[in-house]
Image (cartoon, grey):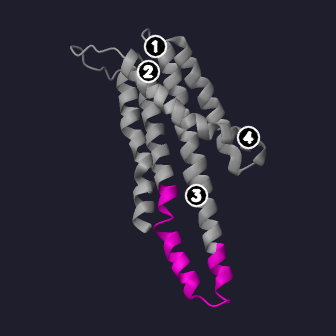
Amino acid sequence: MRAIWAIYAFLPLLLIPGAVGTWFACPSSCGRMTLALVFSILGALAMCLGLMRWPSIHWELAEAYVQAGTEARPALDAVFNGLNLYLGNYIGEFLGEMALAIFFLLSGISMKAETNYPKWLAWSGIVFSLLFMLGAFRNITGVVQPIADINNGLLPLWMIVLGVALIRYSKRDDTSSRSYVPE
């Protein structure tokens, strides 16, 4: 079980190659897409850190809880809850999802600037990113929980649509090299 959690914790890192591909697919927005790439990496690392608490520190806390007497359990509960709130809710979920939403927003804006992407795709990315940002506040206020629930279904769908669209619509000019001059 611990190994499964450890493997699962590394899954957000798969967002990084996708973000690199998106960076290459929007060559006329180099500066914006470089910032988007940074946010994608930040989001992936934050989500990875949030998930790593389960096979590491929470695992150890659970083992200590089983061994602890009734007088020590409230302290272990407090440590568990504090780490869950900080590493899980605020770092892994809020920071990770907010950074990923900013990546989606910057990618959508960049696709709008590209001539080879349909406008519906760019606008879909922008709208989804705003919904995703709003849903990230679910751990702060329950008011946005219905939006977060919708996002749970839309995220995999949007990532598939984005990936297919990047492959289908991106320019394939192998003779030119990418410019690193900011916009």
Q: Which residue is mark 4?
A: 146
Q: Earlier in the sequence, mark 3 or mark 1?
A: 3
Contact between marks 3 and 4 (CB within 8 A): the answer is: no
Q: Amino acid at mark 3?
A: Gly
Magenta-drawn stretch, dominant element (helix, strand or loop): helix
Secondary structure under tag 3 reads helix
Question: Picture coordinates of residue 143 (x, y %)?
Answer: 78, 43
Contact between marks 2 and 1 (CB within 8 A): the answer is: yes
Task: Name which residue lies at 46% across and 68% down.
Answer: 56
Which numbered dot is residue 117?
A: 1
Secondary structure under tag 1 reads loop
Q: Amino acid at mark 4?
A: Pro
Residue 182 seen in the figure? no
Using the rendered view, name the quadrant where residue 175 is placed: top left
Mark 4: give few (<14), some (14-19) or many (20+) Cα within 10 Å.
few
- Residue interval drawn in magenta: 49-78
Residue furthest right in the image: 143
Give the distance between the C-alpha atoms of the residues marked 2 and 3, in whole angstroms.
32 Å
Mark 2: give few (<14), some (14-19) or many (20+) Cα within 10 Å.
some
Q: Which residue is mark 2?
A: 165
Q: Earlier in the sequence, mark 2 or mark 4?
A: 4
Q: Is residue 59 magenta?
A: yes
Which numbered dot is residue 88?
A: 3
Q: Is residue 21 left or right of residue 44?
A: left
Q: Is residue 26 magenta?
A: no
Task: Name which residue lies at 67% across and 89% down.
Answer: 70
Task: Name which residue lies at 55% across and 76% down.
Answer: 62
Viewer-side label of 2, 1: 2
Secondary structure under tag 4 reads helix
